[in-house]
Image (tube, rainbow, N blue to C red):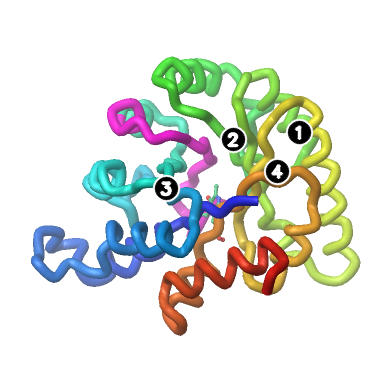
Amino acid sequence: MTLGVNIDHIATLRQARYAADPESPICEPDLVASAAASERAGASGITIHLRADRRHIQDRDVFRLRESITTKLNLEMGNTAEILDIALRVRPEEVCLVPENRAEITTEGGLDAAGQMRALAPAVARLHAAGIRVSLFIEPDPRQIDAAHQLGTAMVELHTGAFANATGPARAGEIRRLHEAALLAHGLGLQVNAGHGINYTNIRDIRALPHIAELNIGHSIIARALTVGLESAVAEMLALMRGTA
Ligand code: PXP
């Protein structure tokens, strides 16, 4: 199980001070340095979400990170013509198509791949033609997994938000849903990734799921980094993922 570190929140912190002054010589924290620290600590990739409203990651970040990252770049994006054009110019190794709603604080809910097949098919085809591996960020729902299979994407990222938020008996139900979804997706030949709301505690349940190839984790790692530093925060998560902590 490998780890993609989502560094959007590092950009959120930078934007809080430097949104109006991006050319400032002390425009910090620096995303290139953060990505490098994550890679040094063992991350297998760096994940960023270029949102339509550019609330955290900026276009120049995407191009700078494309040049500096030595593992792989996973670009999360909504299926819009503008962002698709940028993705085709940047050519990340991977794109994860996500739903995007301007009012949300972070990505809420999975992509309705089953309901948007006609809109998604040309975007997936263009990304594939550019040699980019495509993932769909979907709920652990058989209809959505089947849609990803029909669209021919290499991967799905199962949305773990409902699991992360569930308490009491609902939690076991959410784990079961993820378990069954992982089995189904793997059986259809899809690489199974997971993300959203994964932290240093609930990782123990995520680790026990079958066939999970990669996790994309942002908030908990960046929050922990404030106390122990980014390299240690990434290394601690990797140790928990591998069961060595
Ligand atoms: N995966 C996807 C597709 C996401 O949209 C997000 C949130 O930006 C994450 C993973 C990471 O979620 P979190 O910040 O809760 O770890």
Give the label, 1 or 4, closer to the camera: 1
Looking at the image, do the residues carrying marks 4 and 2 touch, with CB atoms under 8 Å apart?
no
Q: Is residue 25 above or below residue 118?
A: below
Residue at 72%, 32% in the rendered image: 144
Residue 184: % across, % down: 82, 34
Residue at 78%, 41% in the rendered image: 182
Q: Please report whichever mark, 4 or 3, sits nearer to the chain's N-terminal start.
A: 3
Residue at 55%, 18% in the rendered image: 121
Neighbour class for label 1 at 10 Å: few (<14), some, many (≥20)?
many
Q: Write down the region rendered in magenta.
A: 86-108
Q: Name the residue under label 4.
A: 139
Give the label, 1 or 2, closer to the camera: 1
**Does the residue tagged 3 have its C-beta within 8 Å of any atom of ligand 1?**
yes
Amino acid at dot 1: Ala
Residue 152: % across, % down: 62, 19
Q: Is mark 2 on a helix, strand or loop?
A: strand
